[in-house]
Image: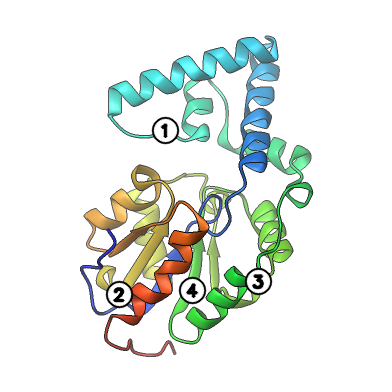
Amino acid sequence: MAEFASTEIRGIVFDLDGTLYVCDRFAAEIHDAAVAYIAGLKRITYAEAGSLMTEIRHRLIEESGMVQTLSAVCVELGGSVQELHNYFERTLRPEAYLVRDERVIRLLERLAGKFSLYIYTNNNRVLTARILNYLGLDGAVRGIFTIDDTWRGKPDEGMLQSVLAEIGLLPSEALFVGDRYDVDLRVPEQLGCPVYLSQNLEQLLRLEKLLNTQPPPTPPL
């Protein structure tokens, strides 16, 4: 995935959490909030909910052979994706953990001069806006697609087709960047999109160099 199969890239679709920023402490808070949601739903203790979610996640991975999202685990336990994200909006505090990185801001600003940039995330719109604003990344992004657009989380081929249609790019023209191959990149790659796995800052910053090895793209309209 370090070498793109396409030389026609005109737009880049980024995942958000774990891709444009990496913060283990905030990731842990998201997980803790999901456990608390299930504990309240099932009327069990936090420890019991955590153990149950771990058990369900392992079973789903074994059955599918793929990484499972928190949303998928919660739905399997009888939860609602919408209720889960309502709980996230009420309880999560990204500003307490995230740190603005000028290198990432400059990277997206430079990329925005050559490509149309988008966010496609399993986070909700309220938290996505707060995170992008706090990190100083909102000005470079042309469009945002979040889980509350349809309440269908990634991976979802139908939603991906809708994203491509809305941004007006062919699969070969849209580079997808994410930190989880099974969640962010497998379906785009199956549809013919170039993909790039980025799981830390060094890999994210390397993206610009890799793109510079491609022929110049057609500037976005």
Q: CA distance from mark 1 to mark 2?
A: 28 Å
Residue underneath mark 1: 68
Q: Residue at x 37, y 23 (%)?
A: 60
How far across and down, in percent of the image, does residue 199 sit? 45, 51
Mark 3 highlights which residue?
A: 102
Q: Height in image: 186 above or below 36?
A: below
Say if 37 sits above or below 10 in the image. above
Residue displayed at 68% across by 52% down: 127
Which percent across, then down, holds residue 37?
67, 25
Q: Are marks 2 and 3 in contact (CB under 8 Å)?
A: no
Q: Is residue 170 left or right of residue 141?
A: left
Name the N-terminal-most of marks 3 and 1.
Answer: 1
Above or below, comparing residue 44 to residue 149 in the picture: above
- SS of the residue at dot 3? helix
Q: Residue furthest front?
A: 202
Viewer-closest of 145 and 128:
128
Q: Earlier in the sequence, mark 4 or mark 2?
A: 4
In the rendered structure, which amino acid carries the disc numbered 2?
A: Glu
The 10 Å Cα crowd at callout 1, few under 14, some 14 to 19, many 20 or more, is many
Type of residue at label 4?
A: Leu
